[in-house]
Image (spheres, rainbow, N blue to C red):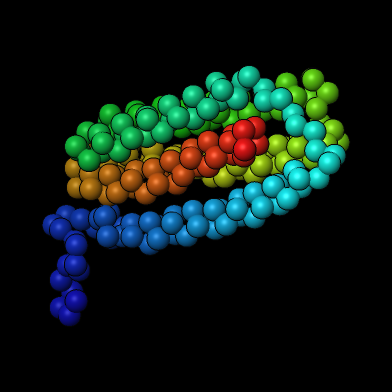
């Protein structure tokens, strides 16, 4: 704006990068990532379905711990929703606490996935066992990598929630950050449910 006045969406005492409009590029980037990951797993699915039609396909039994892992991951989404709503209400400390819970549950899911892999190996199921086990390790491994990326974004949201808890002017930005992070995190959760269906019930 000519004359050096505040730009659109900037309120009094709000510095650059502290308002919700500054997060718009992050939201666009998040949806782009969601689109790219969707295409990636769609290609995996088409290959998986084609491979499953061949006569040498031998299905692998689902490790029971995957049920626990699924519950833990869904609980992390609930915790993140709690954080998002707390941020929208201006309760920065509560939002930060709930974000930490969501991150810990997400990390617990990853540890549970490693336990599932170990259970399969102990049962004699490895990459060399057959095509179904190959796809199980591939799909769950790639999903785990994307969830790890989600944990990094949760860490950023936790840090930003800490700033908002100390400065009321950041409350809007905090809520916007958690909303953006939640888009990706909930997508990863839904993707996991999709993989369960494809791998064991489709």
What residue lies at 85% left-to-right and 39% top-to-bottom? 56
What residue lies at 41% left-to-right and 33% top-to-bottom? 77
Picture coordinates of residue 93 (x, y %)? 27, 31
What residue lies at 19% left-to-right and 76% top-to-bottom? 1
> Does 65 appear above or below 59?
above
90 displayed left or right of 146: left
- Split into 4 quadrants, where in the image is the C terminus? top right
What residue lies at 37% left-to-right and 49% top-to-bottom? 180
Picture coordinates of residue 33 (x, y %)? 50, 56
**Res 113 → quadrant:** top right
Picture coordinates of residue 60 (x, y %)? 74, 29
| Viewer can see residue 100 | no
Q: Nearer the viewer, residue 159 or 21?
A: 21
Q: How many marks?
A: 0
Q: Nearer the viewer, residue 181 or 128?
A: 128
151 displayed left or right of 174: right
150 displayed left or right of 177: right
């Amino acid at each position: 704006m000519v004359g050096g006045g505040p730009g659109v969406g900037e309120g009094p005492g709000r510095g650059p990068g502290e308002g919700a409009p500054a997060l718009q590029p992050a939201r666009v980037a998040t949806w782009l990532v969601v689109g790219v990951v969707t295409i990636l797993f769609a290609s995996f699915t088409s290959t998986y379905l084609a491979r499953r039609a061949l006569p040498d396909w031998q299905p692998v039994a689902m490790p029971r711990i995957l049920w626990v892992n699924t519950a833990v991951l869904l609980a992390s989404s609930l915790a993140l929703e709690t954080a998002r709503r707390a941020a929208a209400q201006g309760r920065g400390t509560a939002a930060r606490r709930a974000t930490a819970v969501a991150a810990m549950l997400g990390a617990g899911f990853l540890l549970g996935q490693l336990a599932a892999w170990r259970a399969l190996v102990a049962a004699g199921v490895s990459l060399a066992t057959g095509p179904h086990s190959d796809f199980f390790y591939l799909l769950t491994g790639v999903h785990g990598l994307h969830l790890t990326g989600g944990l990094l974004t949760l860490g950023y949201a936790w840090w930003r929630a800490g700033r908002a808890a100390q400065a009321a002017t950041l409350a809007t930005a905090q809520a916007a950050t958690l909303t953006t992070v939640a888009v990706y995190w909930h997508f990863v959760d839904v993707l996991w449910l999709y993989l369960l269906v494809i791998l064991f019930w489709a």
